[in-house]
Image (spheres, rainbow, N blue to C red):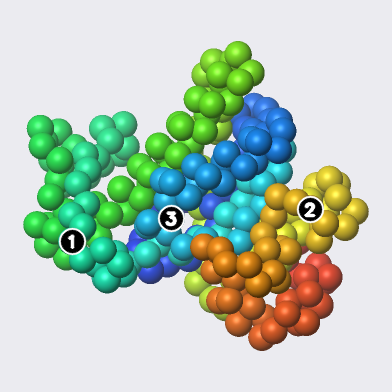
Amino acid sequence: MTKYTLLLEEGKFYHIYNQGNNGENLFYNDNNYIYFLQKLDHYLSDFVDLYAFCLMPNHFHLLIKIKTLEELEENSKERVIEFELVKSLKLNKFEERLAVSSKPVKFQKLNRFDQSTAYSLFISNQFRLFFMSYSKSINKQNGRRGSLFREIFKRKEIDSLLYLQQTVIYIHRNPLHHGLESNFTNYRWSSYDRVLKEKATKLKKNDVLEWFEDKDNYRYVHNSDVGDDIE
């Protein structure tokens, strides 16, 4: 699997990133950044946990973990996830059979292996719906047509604590890396400062701070270049 086709599997961490089609901007004003985060919450917060983010004018970075099926059951015991798989995805025979079904899939009636496969495709489709929804608003705002994002978003599995730490640092230092801010800690559209604040949020900031032991070490390590070359 490549960084374009890697399945988003339950319980795993991923670095998700994408950019504007042909290098075009994704964000033009403060309201665009706010709207992007609102749409991210609407389409994905039930299914993924967010640990870090940075929104740049023409691209973005997210560090997420896919919630497990058990977590979904615990959070909403009465919920039955129903969906139709998108035909445009590259599907195997099982997935294709689900996609052409005239009725939505009753998620809880699938066996555990098929649930996991279908759930991965469902998560990818939620990202697709998220990007489509945001794109429509920007196209309307700017009087443009066509795809706003590159067609397939990139994703990398993060499989160790060290890699998690490096990814968080890389994401937060991105404004410095691209010459947008001389002091990345002042950049408004990243999660760097939000991790340090006590304000309640869905951002998994307590987990992030535990990865770095405490706030002081979090600040200290971010001022190194340990994560600058991981993309």
Amino acid type at mark 1: Glu
Image-based side of 187 in relation to 100, left or right: right
Which of the two discs, 1 and 3, sits closer to the camera? 1
First of labels 2, 3 by sequence position: 3
Name, please, the residue furthest toward the bottom.
Answer: 213
Mark 2 residue crowding within 10 angstroms, few (<14) / some (14–19) / many (20+): many
Image-based side of 50 in relation to 210, left or right: left
Report the front residue among 79 and 155.
79
Give the CA distance from mark 1 to mark 3: 18 Å
Q: Position of residue 192 (x, y in %)?
A: 71, 63
Q: Which residue is mark 3?
A: 45
Q: Position of residue 4 (x, y in %)?
A: 47, 45
**Residue 69 visible somewhere in the drawing:** no
Report the front residue among 179 and 199.
199
Place residue 145 in its image quadrant. Answer: top right
Rendered position, 23 above or below 227: above
First of labels 1, 2 by sequence position: 1
Q: Position of residue 229 (x, y in %)?
A: 73, 60
Question: Which labelled disc corresponds to residue 187?
Answer: 2
Question: Which labelled disc corresponds to residue 41?
Answer: none
Q: Secondary structure at mark 2?
A: loop
First of labels 1, 3 by sequence position: 3
Q: Which residue is mark 1?
A: 78
Q: What residue appears at the point 14 percent right and 33 percent down from the top-left corner? A: 100
Give the CA distance from mark 1 to mark 2: 41 Å
Q: Secondary structure at mark 1?
A: loop
CB-based contact (under 8 Å), mark 1 and mark 3? no
